[in-house]
Image: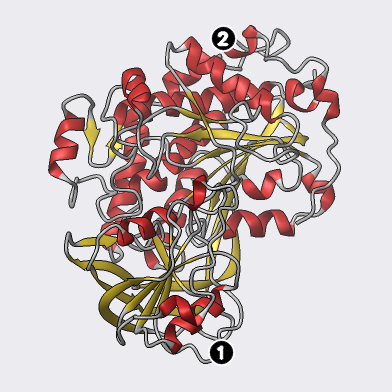
């Protein structure tokens, strides 16, 4: 999607911060039936937010153990959100769209020595070649084919692993070939491995910046008949670090076109030509209830919507619960792609809340001013820095620390920033590892993932399937309910309500539009 010219340059003149009165009380011209930020925080209670999470857990339990788009659990989650919104006086809209539904059962495992199962969707994904995806299972000796595990530190840092038949010299028939991205196409590597007698192929990423995570292996792989998967650089390096390893690769999945849904609700009051949007994805992965990811964001957003609809707002607020985020941000992309330009122009800003109660949390704010230098030039729309400023002020007033969270487009705000719409949001961490510095700031366990149950069955309210040692250590410091850190969720529910209410009164520092009198 091409980036449209921004209309928000007027925000730059006075875009440092919102006035302190906007964060502590309402603007002077507001009518008497408005509430202050402090009053809103009292209305949005942890008890109410946890009640929504309990409902989502019950929905998962009654519908096959997940709330994934295309499944009954997701449809029931949509029904719950709609009912809650209707009870709060909204007239919610449910937007249907079709998507390619997948039931992924692919596996990657080191059998011996040091057995390890790698996580599908986080550490590896199956191939997705245009000419078909061979299903099957193979177990064999791992054969590293001309790898360059030092590639990230070298000037030329380019791998040609698997590009030549000679790279497989000495490989026994029935082996699992491990090749590395770089120089030639994915299909060349996997077909060369097959021709050399491999029973399965693992393609690992190359390792330099921008080439560490997961990417789809697409293209023409005519003749491929063995299972092939793509792994992160770290997962591939871990496989390669164990000489004499036996590895199992399995490609197994079902696919069909299914219908899923987004849910929207607009406040009764506020300028409809200057809309504040706030969203959270409602779906889980197939493996579990998705209570932190993203029940927490959905529940906090829902309770904010319930409480804010009673207020006399200056700007209309549009709430969104996205479908099929876990399938590739499909719901938000569909919504933005379907909006006419004049409707896009009415959106003042977008706020995203994806995982706001991680058990080993940090308080991450999307890095709208790119102070971390992780976003390419021109990637972040003007006005996003001012959104970050507001979140920072709210945490500061609550005497809470905070960190930058990479502005990567990884969640549902991606479709909005592609249209030049200022965006921001919160994130308490997923599979990333808490640092020693962050442990000093927030408590918790350094060297452990922010969410040890990320995309796993144990992302539930009961604690089923958790690593007992890790969660016992976390519970010694925090109040946990299953996979939810209630301290982080309680604070963030208030921060979410504070930020939305702040912009519902005034977006002028972001887009230069003054509130109507």
- Residue 106 position within the rendered picture, expressed as x and y whole percent measured from the top left: 35, 73
- Residue 160 position within the rendered picture, expressed as x and y whole percent measured from the top left: 54, 67
In the image, what residue occupies the spot 16% across and 26% down? 476
In the image, what residue occupies the spot 55% across and 79% down? 188
Determine whether the residue tagged by mark 2 lies in a helix, strand or loop. Answer: helix
- Residue 194 position within the rendered picture, expressed as x and y whole percent measured from the top left: 43, 86
Determine whether the residue tagged by mark 1 lies in a helix, strand or loop. Answer: loop
Mark 1 closeness class: few <14, some 14–19, many ≥20 residues within 10 Å:
few
Mark 2 closeness class: few <14, some 14–19, many ≥20 residues within 10 Å:
some
Q: Give the mark count.
A: 2
- Residue 226 position within the rendered picture, expressed as x and y whole percent measured from the top left: 40, 85
In this rendering, the answer to whether 61 lies above or below 15 is below
- Please tell me in which quadrant of the rendered image residue 5 appears: top right
Screen quadrant of the N terminus: bottom right
User: Is residue 187 visible in the rendered structure shown here?
Assistant: yes
Closer to the camera, 214 or 256?
A: 214
The disc at residue 24 is 2
Q: Which residue is mark 1?
A: 222
- Please tell me in which quadrant of the rendered image residue 229 appears: bottom left
The disc at residue 278 is none
Q: CA distance from mark 2 to mark 1?
A: 63 Å
User: Is residue 67 visible in the rendered structure shown here?
Assistant: no
In the image, what residue occupies the spot 53% across and 35% down? 305
């Amino acid at each position: 999607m091409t980036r449209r010219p921004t209309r928000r340059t007027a925000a730059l003149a006075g875009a440092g911060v919102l006035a302190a009165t906007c964060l502590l009380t309402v603007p002077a011209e507001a009518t008497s039936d408005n509430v202050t930020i402090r009053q809103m925080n009292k209305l949005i209670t942890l008890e109410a937010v946890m009640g929504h999470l309990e409902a989502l857990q019950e929905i998962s339990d009654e519908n096959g153990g997940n709330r994934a788009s295309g499944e009954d659990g997701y449809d029931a989650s949509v029904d719950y959100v709609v009912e809650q919104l209707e009870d709060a006086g909204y007239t919610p809209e449910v937007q249907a769209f079709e998507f390619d539904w997948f039931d992924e059962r692919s596996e990657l495992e080191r059998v011996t020595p040091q057995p390890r199962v790698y996580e599908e969707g986080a550490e590896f994904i199956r191939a997705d070649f245009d000419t078909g995806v061979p299903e099957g299972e193979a177990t064999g000796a791992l054969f590293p084919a001309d790898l360059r595990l030092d590639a990230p530190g070298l000037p030329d840092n380019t791998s040609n692993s698997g590009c030549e038949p000679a790279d497989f010299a000495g490989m026994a028939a029935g082996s699992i070939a491990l090749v590395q991205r770089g120089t030639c196409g994915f299909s060349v590597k996997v077909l060369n491995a097959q021709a050399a007698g491999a029973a399965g192929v693992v393609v690992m990423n190359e390792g330099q910046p921008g080439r560490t995570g997961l990417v789809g292996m697409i293209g023409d792989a005519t003749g491929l008949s063995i299972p092939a998967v793509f792994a992160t650089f770290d997962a591939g390096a871990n496989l390669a670090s164990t000489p004499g390893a036996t590895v199992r690769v399995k490609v197994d999945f079902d696919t069909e076109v299914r219908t899923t849904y987004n849910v929207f609700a607009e406040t009764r009051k506020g300028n409809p030509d200057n809309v504040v949007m706030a969203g959270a994805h409602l779906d889980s992965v197939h493996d579990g209830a998705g209570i932190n990811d993203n029940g927490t964001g959905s529940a906090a957003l829902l309770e904010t919507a319930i409480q804010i609809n009673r207020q006399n707002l200056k700007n209309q607020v549009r709430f969104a619960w996205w479908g099929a985020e876990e399938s590739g941000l499909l719901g938000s992309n569909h919504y933005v792609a379907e909006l006419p330009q004049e409707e896009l122009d009415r959106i003042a800003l977008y706020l995203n809340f994806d995982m706001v109660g991680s058990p080993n949390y940090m308080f991450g704010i999307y890095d709208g001013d790119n102070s971390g230098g992780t976003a390419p030039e021109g990637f972040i729309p003007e006005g996003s820095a001012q959104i970050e400023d507001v979140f920072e002020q709210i945490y500061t007033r609550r005497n809470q620390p905070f960190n930058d969270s990479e502005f990567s487009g990884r969640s549902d705000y991606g479709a909005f920033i592609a249209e030049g719409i200022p965006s921001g949001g919160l994130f308490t961490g997923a599979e990333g590892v808490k640092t020693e510095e962050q442990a000093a700031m927030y408590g918790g366990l350094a060297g452990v993932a922010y969410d040890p149950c990320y995309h796993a069955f144990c992302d539930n309210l009961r604690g089923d399937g958790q690593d007992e040692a890790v969660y016992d250590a976390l519970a010694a410091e925090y109040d946990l309910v299953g996979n939810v850190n209630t301290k982080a969720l309680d604070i963030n529910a208030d921060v979410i309500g504070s930020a939305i209410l702040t912009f519902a009164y005034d977006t002028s520092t972001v887009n230069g539009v003054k509130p109507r009198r």
